[in-house]
Image: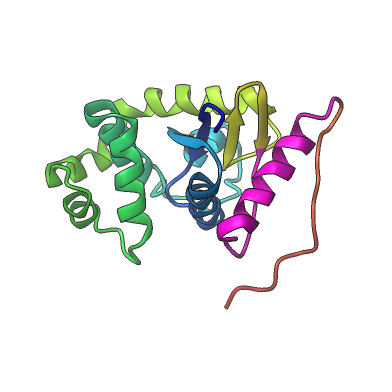
């Protein structure tokens, strides 16, 4: 079997499409020699210079989960970030302490949600992700070696070999010189 490919995955913990893509990428690791390295891309940091926030976050609440993620990464590493993200993403609330506990991390990290001192770390991580694909995108971003792409934006999570085929196809397309964008049909309306 070939050496593992490191797939850097930039995420914003508040984005549902990023959640779907992250679950797909974990499926990929079951059928391809891929290891995920979790990275942060804060939509709040990305959009803070805009007059109108495309996420509709006029109060800045989306900084909170990103800051908790940043605190986890800084104090416990990228693997712990992935574990916390999985625990947090399965919840239907903003109970950071419960998600931290489920992830085996100190619940006190939840207090960092309001720590604006983490914002520069989030801005820098966001900039690294955006530098891989250009300023016209958001999250998720996936980079494997020299190949990087925005997405996939998926409403359903492929499993098993279907996840592997999507991985193979995305790498092939994104590595094509001059490639810029690919879109499919619109996703069905979410209830």
Q: Is residue 91 magenta?
A: no
Work out which residue is located at the far bottom of the displayed protein and give it: 191
Q: Nearer the viewer, residue 157 or 55?
A: 157
Q: Nearer the viewer, residue 159 or 78?
A: 159
Q: Residue furthest front?
A: 1
Is 25 on the left or on the right of 67, as rendered?
right
In percent of the image, x 18 and y 40: which residue is there?
Answer: 109
Tell me residue 123's x, y (percent): 46, 26
Residue at horizontal 80%, vertical 40%? 181
Query: Camera-side residue: 46 or 85?
Result: 85
User: Is 35 situated above or below 21?
Assistant: above
Picture residue at 85% right of the left edge, 25% below the top: 177
43 or 140: which is nearer to us?
140
**Tell me, what colour scheme is on the image?**
rainbow
- Numbered-mark total: 0
Q: Report the quarter where the N terminus lies.
A: top right
Up-down: is 127 above or below 33? above
Residue 163 sits inside the magenta stretch: yes
Q: From this viewpoint, is residue 152 visible?
A: no
Res. 146 in view: yes
For the C terminus, give its image quadrant: bottom right
Q: Residue at x 20, y 55 (%)?
A: 102
The spot of residue 133 in percent (x, y) is: 68, 28
Q: Position of residue 152 (x, y in %)?
A: 65, 48
Q: Which residues are magenta?
A: 150-177
């Amino acid at each position: 079997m070939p050496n593992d490919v490191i797939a850097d995955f930039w995420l914003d913990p508040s984005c549902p499409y990023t959640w779907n893509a992250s679950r797909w990428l974990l499926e990929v690791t079951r059928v391809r020699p891929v290891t995920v390295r979790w990275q942060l891309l804060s939509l709040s940091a990305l959009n803070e210079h805009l007059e109108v926030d495309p996420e509709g976050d006029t109060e800045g609440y989306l900084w909170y989960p990103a800051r908790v993620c940043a605190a986890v990464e800084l104090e416990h590493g990228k693997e712990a970030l992935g574990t916390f993200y999985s625990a947090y993403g399965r919840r239907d609330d903003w109970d950071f302490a419960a998600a931290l506990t489920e992830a085996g991390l100190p619940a006190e990290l939840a207090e960092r949600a309001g720590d604006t001192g983490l914002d520069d770390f989030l801005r820098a991580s966001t900039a690294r992700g955006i530098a891989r694909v250009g300023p016209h995108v958001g999250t998720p971003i996936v980079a494997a070696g020299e190949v990087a792409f925005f997405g996939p934006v998926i409403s359903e999570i492929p499993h098993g070999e279907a996840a592997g085929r999507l991985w193979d196809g995305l790498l092939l397309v994104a590595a094509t010189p001059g490639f810029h964008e690919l879109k499919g049909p619109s996703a069905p309306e979410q209830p």
